[in-house]
Image (tube, rainbow, N blue to C red):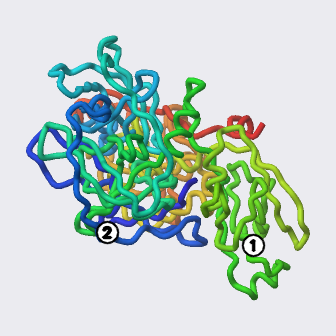
């Protein structure tokens, strides 16, 4: 499920255990940050509290045990996009993570270990060789990836690990990987302290089931298996920084892993679908009586419905959700699944694009049943991190225009209140209907043709020469078709920005040469069109 976010730049809390750098060991990186809670009704449980780790004796791994014959060390060379100069290739980074062999001679690891990678190598225990590897599937929304090694002899004598279930609270687990501090395999042991929904910080918007453990895991443990009774019960992936909580780490549990593997079984990863609604719990007796609810402690109230989502036209604001696929929804938004209590969205979490979900609802005090065909609404991508894509931009007259999203917001640390509103309420206020791209004048490359235009930096483009601009492609077309003068109006009451097209054209090569600009625009990765959204619903 998705979390509607508000970005807060004070304090880094939750972070993936990013792979250890191949240089002098440094403290664990603490990025990306956890967004603050979105204003309005909550869709999730609060972040986990600090847990005091319980010391557990650590048994050394057997020299030729199954984990040693499955665990691999992954070295990734990646190129991080440069959102401040998007025409550049970006910065080169190299790091180390872990992975392990599963059925089909595949290697499971974290998405954040291999995201943006350009070259991968893997090493196995007792073998000095580094084997080139390729990413087969990557799921950034649940921080999992599969990689393969073309060399046919790589998996010789390696043992695929098998998956277990969800470990019991207070049971002991062991985490394996290659954390900072050494080159050999490391194993640490801890207890299971919480099973809950948490934000997956790799995407910064997706929430799925997680398991909190007290095992000491650090950068370099990412992608390594967490074992119990010789079976994988999770994949280590993120935790709190040491300044916030000690001994609090998280693993991706097997229901999320198995769903990922089932999703890719057709050769394509479709991502998690989402209901695209917000809701409020109905635990206040007076409110329940007002809505005509029985005194049976059931139901949650629909607060909003995303117009681009699968629930649009089926659910309405004010509907009360009573049951999902036959599972009664309690007033605290939980259902009983396989003998355990879980948020009702877990029913949706187990489904795939194109599947349907059935709700028993109360509308205007009348009971009814509705069915929703599931898919992932495109607007959520704006509020999450993107990987393995080049930044979209248009450079014109030294003015850099970019769509507003989480990556550009973090790159520039833009503090303009209007910008923050457009980002934070992009979904809740349905801004995407009028502005599929919220286009920002993000930077200015100084040149005589754009002097004195600094006050416009951070402005949101509304129209060019009287034509409304909704997407980055429309902006590029407006510049290409402009007459001698371009009048760019920003959202708000300020004066327009005016450019002389002839002078802009005369300055193009000068600006490109001065700032090493190889390409003046990249329009790929456009927002989904209306036709595509309609196709998702059919």
- Seen from the viewer's position, the closer of residues 269 and 278 is 269
Question: Which residue has dot 1 on it?
Answer: 298
- Dot 1 alpha-carbon crowd within 10 angstroms: few under 14, some 14 to 19, many 20 or more: many
Q: Which residue appears at 23% of the width and 41% of the height?
A: 61
Sequence order check, earlier mark of 2 and 1:
2
Which of the labelled discs sits on residue 116, or is there none?
Answer: none
Relative image position of residue 404 (x, y in whole percent): 46, 51
Q: Are marks 2 and 1 in contact (CB under 8 Å)?
A: no
Tell me the quarter of the picture where residue 179 sits: top left
Question: Which residue has dot 2 on it?
Answer: 10
- Seen from the viewer's position, the closer of residues 523 and 424 is 424
> Is residue 32 at least partly visible in the picture?
no
Relative image position of residue 155 (x, y in whole percent): 33, 19
> Is residue 273 at least partly visible in the picture?
yes
**Which structural element holds mark 1?**
loop
How many numbered discs?
Answer: 2
Relative image position of residue 503 (x, y in whole percent): 36, 37
In this picture, residue 323 sits left or right of residue 100: right
Instruction: Work out which quarter of the rendered image holds the C terminus and state it.
Output: top right
Tell me the quarter of the picture where residue 135 sits: top left
Relative image position of residue 315 (x, y in whole percent): 78, 58
Q: Which residue appears at 27% of the width and 36% of the height?
A: 90
In this picture, residue 72 sits left or right of residue 270: left
Q: Residue furthest bottom?
A: 286
- Seen from the viewer's position, the closer of residues 353 and 249 is 249
- Dot 2 alpha-carbon crowd within 10 angstroms: few under 14, some 14 to 19, many 20 or more: few
């Amino acid at each position: 499920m998705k979390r509607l976010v508000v970005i807060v730049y004070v304090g880094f809390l939750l972070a993936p255990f990013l792979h250890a750098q191949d240089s002098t060991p440094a403290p664990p990186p603490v990025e990306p940050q956890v967004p603050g809670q979105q204003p309005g009704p909550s869709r999730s449980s609060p972040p986990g509290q600090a847990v005091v780790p319980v010391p557990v004796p650590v048994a050394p791994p057997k020299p030729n045990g199954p984990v040693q014959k499955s665990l691999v060390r992954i070295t990734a060379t990646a190129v991080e996009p440069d959102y401040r100069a998007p025409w550049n290739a970006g910065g080169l980074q190299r790091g180390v993570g872990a992975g392990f062999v599963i059925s089909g001679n595949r290697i499971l690891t974290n998405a954040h270990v291999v995201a943006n990678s350009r070259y991968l190598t893997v090493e196995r225990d007792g073998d000095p060789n580094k084997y080139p590897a390729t990413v087969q599937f990557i799921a950034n929304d649940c921080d999992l990836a599969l990689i393969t090694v073309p060399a046919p002899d790589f998996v010789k004598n390696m043992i695929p690990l098998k998956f277990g279930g969800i470990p019991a609270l207070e049971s002991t687990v062991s985490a394996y990987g290659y954390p900072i501090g050494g080159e050999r395999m490391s194993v640490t042991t801890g207890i299971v302290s919480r099973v809950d929904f948490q934000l997956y910080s790799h995407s910064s918007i997706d929430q799925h089931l997680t398991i909190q453990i007290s095992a000491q895991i650090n950068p370099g443990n990412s992608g390594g298996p967490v074992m119990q009774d010789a079976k994988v019960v999770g994949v280590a992936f993120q935790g709190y920084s040491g300044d916030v909580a000690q001994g609090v780490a998280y693993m991706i549990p097997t229901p999320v892993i198995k769903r990922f593997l089932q999703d890719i079984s057709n050769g394509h990863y479709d991502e998690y679908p989402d209901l695209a609604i917000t809701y409020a719990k109905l635990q206040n007796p007076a409110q329940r009586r007002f809505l005509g609810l029985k005194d049976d402690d059931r139901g949650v109230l629909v607060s909003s419905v995303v117009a681009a989502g699968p629930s649009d036209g089926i659910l309405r604001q004010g509907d009360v959700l009573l049951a999902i696929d036959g599972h009664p929804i309690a007033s605290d938004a939980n259902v009983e699944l396989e003998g355990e209590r879980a948020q009702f969205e877990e029913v949706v979490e187990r489904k795939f694009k194109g599947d349907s979900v059935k709700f028993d609802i109360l509308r205007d005090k009348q009971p009814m049943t509705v069915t929703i065909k599931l898919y992932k609404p495109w607007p959520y991508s704006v509020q999450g991190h993107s990987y393995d894509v080049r930044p979209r931009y248009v450079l014109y007259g030294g003015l850099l225009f970019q769509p507003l999203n989480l990556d550009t917001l973090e790159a520039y640390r833009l503090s303009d209140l209007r910008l923050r509103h457009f980002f934070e309420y992009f979904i809740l206020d349905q801004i995407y209907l009028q502005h599929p791209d919220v286009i920002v004048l993000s930077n200015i490359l100084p040149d005589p043709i754009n002097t004195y235009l600094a006050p416009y930096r951070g402005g949101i483009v509304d129209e060019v020469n009287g034509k409304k601009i909704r997407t980055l492609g429309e902006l590029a077309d407006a510049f290409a078709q402009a007459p001698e003068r371009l009048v760019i109006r920003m959202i708000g009451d300020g004066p327009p920005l005016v450019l002389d097209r002839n002078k802009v054209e005369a300055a193009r090569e000068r600006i490109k040469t001065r700032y090493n600009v190889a390409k003046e625009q990249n329009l790929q990765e456009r927002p989904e069109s209306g036709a595509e959204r309609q196709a998702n619903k059919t």
